[in-house]
Image (tube, rainbow, N blue to C red):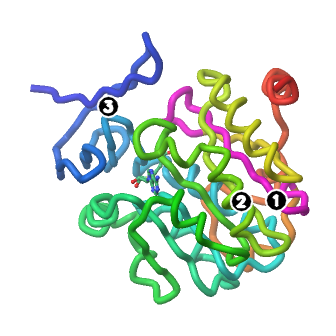
Amino acid sequence: MELWFTEEWIPGLKLSVQVKSLVHKTKTKFQELAVYDTEALGRILVLDDVIQTTEVDEHIYHECLVHVPLLAHPNPEEVLIVGGGDGGSLREVLKHRTVKRATLVDIDEGVIEASKKFLPQWNTGFSDPRARVVIANGLDFVAEAKEEYDVVIVDSTDPIGPGEALFREEFYRSIKGALRPGGIMAAQTENPIFMPDIVKMVFGRISSVFPVAKLYTGPMPTYPGGFWSYTCATLGPDPSEPARDAGGIAFRYYSPEIHRRAFVLAPEVAKDLSAR
Ligand code: SAM
């Protein structure tokens, strides 16, 4: 009998992937977690029935979310990742030799434990001596931090459940306070075609807090609409231009040309943001 995992993207539209086997399923303190091996997408991590990351395209998402802010910064030494319990963002951050410490704060220890056991493609950063893992609500953790980080990355679930806190204006204010001078933040900010109201609202909140805020986009085949947005906000520098050479990192998706191009928005998306 064929087994399929199905995620509802929006009402009336679903993504289905054929499952080879269920690798792990549990209910953590915060969410339902499942790891499947699938025919088309390789290993996938699912939280509350939403695909978080898949073996075939996680590199696109993580390289867009991480390398754009880290390469827009001239010398990122202290980096904070909020969410990202699968470890993909941490792995990418640690590819930068400038990074002295990468702190990952996830509310759910269950996700990190599942990654360590079942997600070998993602979990390599956890054993790096520069990595520090904290189990806490990112909202509370960031509120305590004062001018500590060069770059803050928000690798959250969608704005429902525990992830909702990571889309609040007060959270973005705390991130601003947690950044050192010249600091940069990047956050995943959903799909501008299927969720224009969410993108507009989140971008509006971020740009009301930071002096510079720019949306950028990239393909993401297994997220709703196959296309994803990120918002980069800074205390001054223009994030749409790489500030330095990548120092020999072997990228699969990112390049300096893709960095610049990612900030070129379709007129409809740009109009939506300026109309907020
Ligand atoms: N790339 C994924 C996406 O866009 O769907 C997100 C991946 S990562 C698995 C998301 C992480 O955010 C989860 O591990 C979840 O536990 C964490 N998270 C959700 N709400 C949080 C909060 N308030 N504080 C810290 N971590 C949170």
Which badge, 2 or 3, comes first in the chain's sequence? 3
Between circles 3 and 1, the one closer to the viewer is 1
Element assignment for label 3? strand
Residue furthest left as drawn: 1
Q: Residues within 10 Å of mark 3 (few under 14, many from 20)?
A: some
Question: Residue visible at 68% across and 63% down?
Answer: 67
Which badge, 2 or 1, comes first in the chain's sequence? 2
Quarter of image, res 11: top left
Which amino acid, by three-letter code, is at mark 3? Val
Q: Which residues are magenta?
A: 220-240
- Some atom of ligand 1 lies within 8 Å of the CB belonging to the residue at label 1: no
- Work out how far the residue at label 2 is from the one at label 1, CA to CA, in angstroms: 6 Å
Q: Position of residue 264 (x, y in %)?
A: 84, 39
Residue named by callout 2? 185
Residue named by callout 3? 17
Q: Position of residue 226 (x, y in %)?
A: 56, 31
**Contact flag, marks 2 and 1 (Cβ < 8 Å):** yes
Question: Residue visible at 49% across and 81% down?
Answer: 131
The answer to if 190 sits in the magenta stretch is no
- Label number found at residue 234: 1
Q: Residues within 10 Å of mark 2 (few under 14, many from 20)?
A: many
Between circles 2 and 3, the one closer to the viewer is 2
Element assignment for label 2? strand
Which amino acid, by three-letter code, is at mark 2? Met
> Closest to the observer: 183 or 263?
183
Question: Residue visible at 78% across and 26% down?
Answer: 269
**Contact flag, marks 2 and 3 (Cβ < 8 Å):** no
Quadrant holding the C terminus: top right
Which badge, 3 or 1, comes first in the chain's sequence? 3
